[in-house]
Each structure stands twice: as C-alpha cells, then as structure tokens.
Image (cartoon, grey):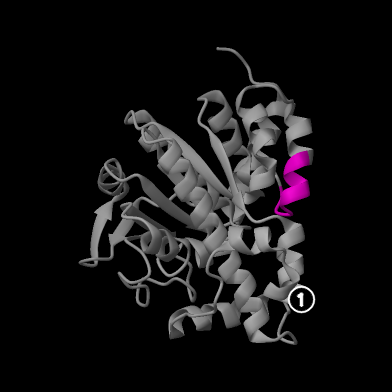
Amino acid sequence: MRKIPLRRSVSCLVLALVFILSGGCVARKAMRLQDRTIVSVDDMDRALQDVRLIFVGEYHKKLGHHMMQLDVIKALDRAGVKLAIGLEMFTAENQEVLDRWVAGEMTEMAFRKRYYRNWKVPWYKYRGIFIYARKHKIPLVGLNISKKVSHKLFIGGPRALSPEERAALGDISCDVDMEYEKMIREAMEEHEHMGMEFQAFCRVQMSWDSFMASKIIDYLVANPGRTMVALAGSGHAWKRGIARKVIAATRLDSIVILPEVSGEYDRKDVSFGDADFLLLER
C-alpha cells in the first residue's frame, strides 16, 4: 500500500480540523418550509432540477456554508443540469477575469489576487467552488455592483450618481417590510454602522439586491439553456432580497435555500416567506 507523506497527511489533518472548528458539518437534512417537513438533502436536490434560478445563502465566514453550496452545485451538475454560478463576491466589471479563470487562462495565484480585490473573506473558504467550476467548465458570473458606484451612493445618495449609474441600479427605494428592516438594522450593528442614517444604509442594501437581480435576469435571458445557482449572503439570498426583485421583473421560477444559523436563521423562526428550504445544522 502506498504511503502518504507525513507533510501531506498533516496538511489533510489541519484542513479537517479547520472544517470541524468552523462549524462546517455538511447538512444531511433540510426543512421544506412550505409544509415544514424534514426531508433528505437528496430530496431537496431533486426539487431543484426543474428550476432556472436557485439562491443558496451563506454567512460569508462559515466554511461549512460554502461546502454546502458546493454540494448543491455538484448535485445539479451530476444530474446533467447546465449550470452557471452567480457570485456576490465578484463585481460585474470583473467578468473577464472570471471567464479567463474558467477557461484555464489564469494561474490560481493570479486569480486569487483578483479575488482579494473584490472580497475580503479568506480565499480558502470559496476555493472549492472556484476549482470545481474551472474543472467542469461551469460559467462564473459576477453579480455585484462596482465599489465606486456603491461608495458614491453611500456617501452622496442617488443624486451623486450619473444618469447611467442610476439607471443601472433600478429601484433602490427603501420600501421593505418589518422583517427586512429588522435584518438591515442588525446588519448595521454587525458592521458597526449604527452612527449612520438608516435610509443611507438601506439604499446601499437595495442597490445590491436590485443590481444583482438585473445581472441574473440578463444572464438567464441571454442563456436560455442554463440554470443559475446564485451564491450570496443570506440577507441578499432570502426571498425578501434579490429574489423579490427578480420576481417583480420576470416570471422566472426560483428556489431559495438558506443554511440554519442558531439565533439568526433558526428552524423555529424561518418561514416560507423567507425561503423554500432550510438546511439544518443537525
């Protein structure tokens, strides 16, 4: 039997420990929120195969959530669904970079540098998704608004934007229900923006939802043979976020999957108005 080098075996052990300590146990059960029935992840995956748009939420820093997202992607890919992966963590203006990565025209080091220009969460948490997409030639689609436009909106409001920038954002009015307002205020506190005016923070949140929805619609209209798995923070991925904007503009069927997070997205509190499936922690 071939021996595994000690250095390699230690590396594998370290990665396993990182996964365990991150709370990254892969979910084996899901709650179907329409009737609150506990189903297997395989049953959930089968329900996804006839839908053109699937949102899979995340807490950015939880490795287990990204492994869960990869499991959904793998299940659909193995079922023969022609996929694209939509990414909150890349801006739309970086689309050429994503295309070059999938085509095998960039080294991992070069791509990782471009990733960090877009996103601050450690690379290794998303690496498995990017490697799988490259290996299986699954298109990656940058969904997010440019940092320049987001900053202008944040500092100066809609008046600071050019007519072209304003048109690209669509509806960014802070017309949200109580549940969404509660989530936004909690996000403000988490990101230490409590000194900021609520409407300003809300407009930025709405701009992300609206812009990402438009990018998703544009891609699916231009690529009628593909299904998109859109990866975004749960505050954007839930039904009150990007999905609401997509539904308002099109008749695209979509399914929303959120990972359970104790005290945040808990099975006792998450409803069918939030998501279609809740992937359970245990």
* Type of the residue with mark 1: Gly
Residue drawn at (76%, 68%) of the image:
152
Q: Residue 154 versus residue 11: which sits nearer the camera? A: 154
Establish if 193 lies above or below 41.
below
Residue 82 rendering spot, x and y as whole percentages = 39, 31
Q: Residue at point 29% right, 49% down? A: 44
Where's the N terminus, which quadrant? top right
- Characterize the local packing of mark 1: few (<14), some (14-19) or many (20 or more) Cα atoms within 10 angstroms: few
User: Where, by quadrant of the figure, is residue 46 drawn?
Assistant: top left
* Frontmost residue, 164 versus 86: 164
The one nearer the camera, 143 or 71, is 143
Residue at 72% from the left image edge and 61% from the top image edge: 149
Where does the image place residue 13, in percent across and percent down from the top left?
64, 38
Left or right: 2 in relation to 82: right
The residue most toward the top is: 1
Whether residue 17 is visible here, answered yes or no, is: yes
Residue 118 painted magenta: yes
Residue 7: % across, % down = 74, 28
| Residue 259 shows in the view | no
Report the quarter where the C terminus lies. bottom left
* Chain part drawn in magenta: 114-122
In x, y percent, where is residue 27?
A: 41, 52
Q: Quadrant of residue 269?
A: bottom left
Position of 151 compared to 134: left or right? Answer: right
The answer to whether residue 236 is left or right of residue 145 is left
Residue to which mark 1 is pinned: 156
- Where, by quadrant of the figure, is residue 243 drawn? bottom left
88 part of magenta stretch: no
* Mark 1 element type: helix
Residue located 33% across and 73% down the image: 271
